[in-house]
Amino acid sequence: MTTSNISLPRIAVLATGGTIAGQAGDASKTAGYKAGVVGVDKLLDAVPALSQVARIHAEQVASIDSKDMSTALWVTLGKRINVLLAQDDIDGVVVTHGTDTLEETAYLLHLTVKSEKPVVLTAAMRPSTALSADGPLNLLNAVTVAAHGSAAKQGVMVAFNNQIHSARDVTKTSTYAVDAFRSPEVGALGWVQDGRVEFQRAVVRRHTAQSQFDLEAALPSVEIVASYAGASRAAIDAFVAAGVKGLVIAGTGNGSVHATLQQALADAIGKGVAVVRSSRVSSGHVMRNGAAPDDALGSVSAGTLNPYKARVLLMLALAAGITDAAAIQQIFDTY
């Protein structure tokens, strides 16, 4: 789909599948559908108002349910975005994605896109065939944000249900509601409605063009382990035996770790495995030494990053050859 008005910004829309491209036999059903069925051309055709917002360059990068997102597809997507944004005739990128792992993909791109041009992810909670499908408006709003001058230098964003979120802060907070995405600790960046875009704050941590990370080195194996009542060390020992390079702990409260797990982590660190403490709580931050002896143990605090985003940042740090705990802590304090 390409519009004819050459004065409009040119936005690349990269489709990866997800519920926004989902299809069900019954329009009254919002579960039990098949994700990633509808191609990018049909997604765009469902939103004729796009022609008044931007000239569209469309590509189908993948057609998956985002629960099946892989690191290999992350690399493919990130490299393609960087190629497109390096072109003078591309003013921004929109990625259609599934909601399940959207926050992880968004944060990876936030750290590896090498451009100040806007990158906006969007998705849907209802398949394209559902009554009151939310995908078309989310797509229109995402393109509107990507085409707006104020979106430059904001890093990678998520446009969803009229809100604009930073990739670093946003997380999925509902299994069914159309306002499923929130930034619990700091709130949305701004909003988009009926063609109007307003930013109410700016992203202050390093990202995109200022980030030191890229996708050239292979992403190492980093796994997540939860702490809970009666936790066993079996998962940590198995991961270490399998050769993981890093572990993220979804701790209780302020990143606290069950005593049994703490001993297992000490053993893992002794074998060269990097360990980051995050929290399974939906908001707040994990203080260094606040709930575990980081200095003595050699572990790292994730700050405000949830376990899934902490995993992304740890993978990138290890891929860049950063293995010392103090240096990894500096990375988490910076990004």
Image (cartoon, grey):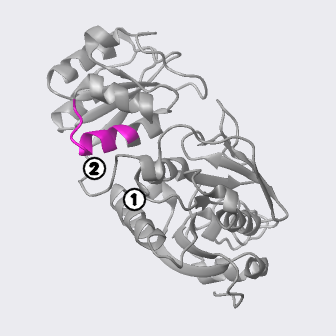
Number of marks in picture: 2
Residue 99 in picture, x, y percent from top left: 59, 54
Image point 47% across, 46% down: which residue? 207
Of the 4 image quadrants, the one containing the C terminus is: top left
Would you say the residues marked 1 and 2 are in contact, meaning their CB atoms lie under 8 Å apart?
Answer: yes
Residue 205 falls left or right of residue 297: right
Stretch of the chain drawn in magenta? 313-323
Q: Main secondary structure of the magenta part?
A: helix
The secondary element bearing badge 1 is classed as helix
Of the 4 image quadrants, the one containing the N terminus is: bottom right
Compute the Cα span from label 1 to label 2.
10 Å
Image point 25% across, 18% down: which residue? 264
The stretch drawn in magenta includes residue 321: yes
The secondary element bearing badge 2 is classed as loop
Depicted 80 relative to depicted 109: above or below: below
Depicted 153 relative to depicted 7: above or below: above
Q: Which residue is mark 2?
A: 219
Amino acid carrying mark 1 in the image: Trp
Q: Is residue 65 visible?
A: yes
Residue 107 falls left or right of residue 75: right
Residue 221 falls left or right of residue 148: left
Image point 58% across, 60% down: which residue? 118
Disc ID at residue 74: 1
Residue 141 in picture, x, y percent from top left: 73, 63
Depicted 211 relative to depicted 331: above or below: below
Residue 231 in picture, x, y percent from top left: 38, 18
| Residue at the bottom extreme of this rendering | 4
Specify few, some or many for label 2: CA neighbours under 10 Å numbering under 14, 14-19, or 20 or more.
some
Amino acid carrying mark 2 in the image: Leu
Q: Is residue 39 visible?
A: no
The stretch drawn in magenta includes residue 219: no
